Every structure is written in structure tokens, then in C-alpha cells.
Amino acid sequence: MKGLMPLDPTFFLSDPTGPGDLLPTLEFDRNPTVLLVFAANRFTRNAARFLHQRYGIGAMDWRMMVMLTKEPDIPVSRASKVIGIDKAAVSRSLTRLHKNGLAEPKIPSGDSRRKSWSLTEKGRQLHKEILDLALHRQQKILEGFSEDEVLTLNAMLGRLLENISSLDNGEEESE
Amino acid sequence: MKGLMPLDPTFFLSDPTGPGDLLPTLEFDRNPTVLLVFAANRFTRNAARFLHQRYGIGAMDWRMMVMLTKEPDIPVSRASKVIGIDKAAVSRSLTRLHKNGLAEPKIPSGDSRRKSWSLTEKGRQLHKEILDLALHRQQKILEGFSEDEVLTLNAMLGRLLENISSLDNGEEESE
DNA sequence: CTTTTTATGTTGTCATGTCAACACATAACG
DNA sequence: CGTTATGTGTTGACATGACAACATAAAAAG
């Protein structure tokens, strides 16, 4: 744990003595959480547009296809935990992939609450096709970043995720 | 423009010689774009939950309140450009804020397509109240980050935003 | 001056992701 | 063994953000 002092909160604010006697608020380009949400929204919109135009699928379904490749034969609840998305949305995405012939369920016990999902052959082929393009696009997004910078960025985003998860787990009622 | 080589694409992939002869796909903790979206989703959900429980407003409306504080008397299209969100969503958010007595329009020319929006006194008070808490929460999210690390993270997120915007502007059809 | 183009804000519809409720089976408790 | 709690997957409703279409006024072009 670093012992360094955090930034003074005024760093994150617009200058309250600026023109027109404006009130202070968050300065967009000084707040990591603002930039994070902006960048992610912009990325998702761009990816969604590209995926839909070329393949007729949504960003969520692509993400689910990656999940099923990493871990075939996976139940909804496990996928929800790993991918960090509500099981209702996971359930719907898998249903869409199933309807499109890209994924199939197994129900060994006959109880549909003991389902597990895998990609079909068609799904595996589509996944491979999109993967190449997804990597290509990410390379463009990382243009100008050195290897060290990518590793640093990954590490920082990972730490942000952990800190946000800590807030999720109820460490926030101390104010 | 840096002359450094980008990472080899296999860095971003799961090990294809791993257990069970799995196919390669994106490794979640090695892909900045995956981590970006995960972190932003997690942050937004956490913030949305907090804002709704305490103040009965959504994350989008809070974001709009910040916008109106930075730039009072702003039209929908300008707000849409600055905040990077579709004007339809901006229009709806402003309507909600208006209904809740937090924002008000000016229509000097009588033409409702020449509207501009500002916070009401009630809106300014709520903004001030939420701002303190938002800064506090961001400090917790940045726990363990040094001043230099925050500046580095801001810069990197800014560069990602620029690169994604370049993709938006049609530099992607070269494949 | 007339026609065409552009910009604006609103509304309908859709994808994404959340929250809640439900039915039902299994696990845990007394 | 009976009761209670927990986990699972589905579905309804909602917030967020996008895309498209529309009505209308102003700007630009001829």
C-alpha cells in the first residue's frame, strides 16, 4: 500500500474564479472516473456500430462469445460472475445467441436451471473471424502506446476495478 | 508520434495450449479495452445505485447537472457535443431535470429549437451537495494511486479517447 | 428570389445492463 | 423428517445511450 498523499480535491474541480463567476464542478479532463466513462462509452458505441454493420450482432453478444470460448460448458450464474454483468442480461444474450445458431445449451439433469452453454461450430467460426478484427481495432486504439504503457494502463485499470469493487461491498457508509 | 513497437497481438490472447485444448480468445486482464469497459460499467452501476438511493436521480442526470454548471445557458446540441452523448438522450435528461424542478429552459426567440438550459436554484443546491460526495467517492476509488499515477492515468485515458475518436471519423476502412 | 441543404430538438424504437419478482430444486437448520 | 434458506434461470419493468425519422427554421447555393 503506497503511503503517498492523494491529490488535493481542488485538482479535480474547475477554477471557481473563472469567467462569469461560475460555480465549481468536475473538470472533465481532470477526473479519471469521468474520462473512464467517456472513453468506455465511446469505445462501446464504436464497437457496437462496427459489429452490427458487419455481423448483425451486438457488443454484448460478442462479449458472451468470448466468454464461451474461454470457458465452454458454462452456466449463466458463473458467466455472470466472471463477466461482471447481471444474470438477467446474460440469460437474454445466451437466448439470442441460441436463436442465431451460435450457441447451444446442455441440460444433463433435465432441470433447465442446471443448464450450461457452449458455442456451436458456427459460433466458433464467427468468433474466430471477429477476434482477428477486434485485435486489429485494439491495436489502432493503442497506437502510440509503448509496451510499458500498455502494461501500466492494464495495471491501473485493474486497480480501479478492485477499488470500485470494494465500494460495492459496502465500505462506503463511513461518511 | 512514438516510434515504439506495439505489443505482439498474442499478448492479448489466452494461451491456446492451455488445458482442454481451448481456442484462443481475448484474455480479460490483458486487454485494455476489456478492462476499460468492465471498470466503467462497474463504476456507473455503483454510482447509479448510490445516486438513486440518496437523491432519486440517475447517473445521466447528475452528469447533465455537471454540464449545466460548467456551461450555463447551453443548447441541447452543444451539450451533446461536449459530453459526447447523443442529443436524444440529452434532450430527455433535460426534460427530466425540468420536471424535477432542477433545470429550466430559456427560449428567447420563441422558437423551441433555440432553447438553452440552466440549473435552477434548487438544482444548484443539489449539485453542490452531490459534488462533495462524488469527490469523496472518487478519492476512495483512487486510493493507493500517487499524484503522478493519477496524472498518468488521465493522460492515457485522454489518448485512448482521441484514438477512439479517430476510428469514429472513418480511419478504419484500411483493412 | 427560389430552391436546396443544414441544423435543431423531439419522439419512437432498440440494445445494454440493472433491479426485482417468481417458480422450483437443493442445501442447511432445528 | 419438516421447515427454512439459498441458488438457479427466466421474465417484467426501468435507466441509459444509440439510431432514425420527423417537423421546422435558418443558412447556403444558384
Image (cartoon, coloured by chain):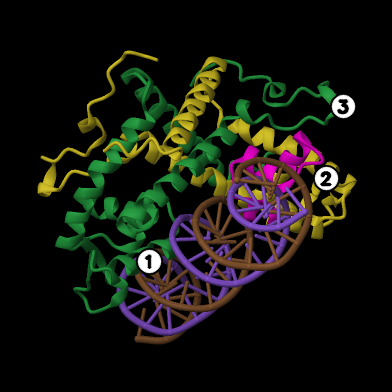
Chain colours: A green, B yellow, C purple, D brown
- Magenta residues (range): B65-91
Q: Nearer the viewer, mark 2 or mark 1?
A: 2
Task: Report the Cα–Cα distance between label 2 and label 1.
Answer: 40 Å
Element carrying mark 3: helix
Label 2, on which residue? Answer: B119
Magenta-span inclusion, residue A156: no
**Which quadrant holds residue B164?**
top left
Mark 3 or 1, nearer chain start: 3
Q: Report the amino acid beneath label 2.
A: Leu
User: Which residue is at a point 70% across and 32% down the rendered structure image?
Assistant: A26
Q: Residues within 10 Å of mark 2 (few under 14, many from 20)?
A: many
Q: Position of residue B92 (x, y in %)?
A: 69, 57
Q: Position of residue A55 (x, y in %)?
A: 30, 57
- The answer to whether dots 3 and 1 both sit on one chain is yes
**Subunit of label 1:** A
Q: Position of residue A153 (x, y in %)?
A: 41, 26
User: Which residue is at a point 75% across and 34% down the rendered structure image?
Assistant: B70
Q: Is residue B63 visible?
A: no
Label 3, on which residue? Answer: A21
Label 1, on which residue? Answer: A91
Tell whether B62 sits left or right of D4.
right
Q: Report the amino acid beneath label 3.
A: Asp
**Subunit of label 2:** B
**Which quadrant holds residue A140?**
top left
Q: Residues within 10 Å of mark 3 (few under 14, many from 20)?
A: few
Task: Report the Cα–Cα distance between label 2 and label 3.
Answer: 15 Å
Q: Quadrant of the N terminus of chain B?
A: top left
- The answer to whether dots 2 and 3 both sit on one chain is no
Task: Report the Cα–Cα distance between label 3 and label 1.
Answer: 51 Å
Q: Report the amino acid beneath label 1.
A: Ser
- B100 vs B134, nearest the viewer: B100
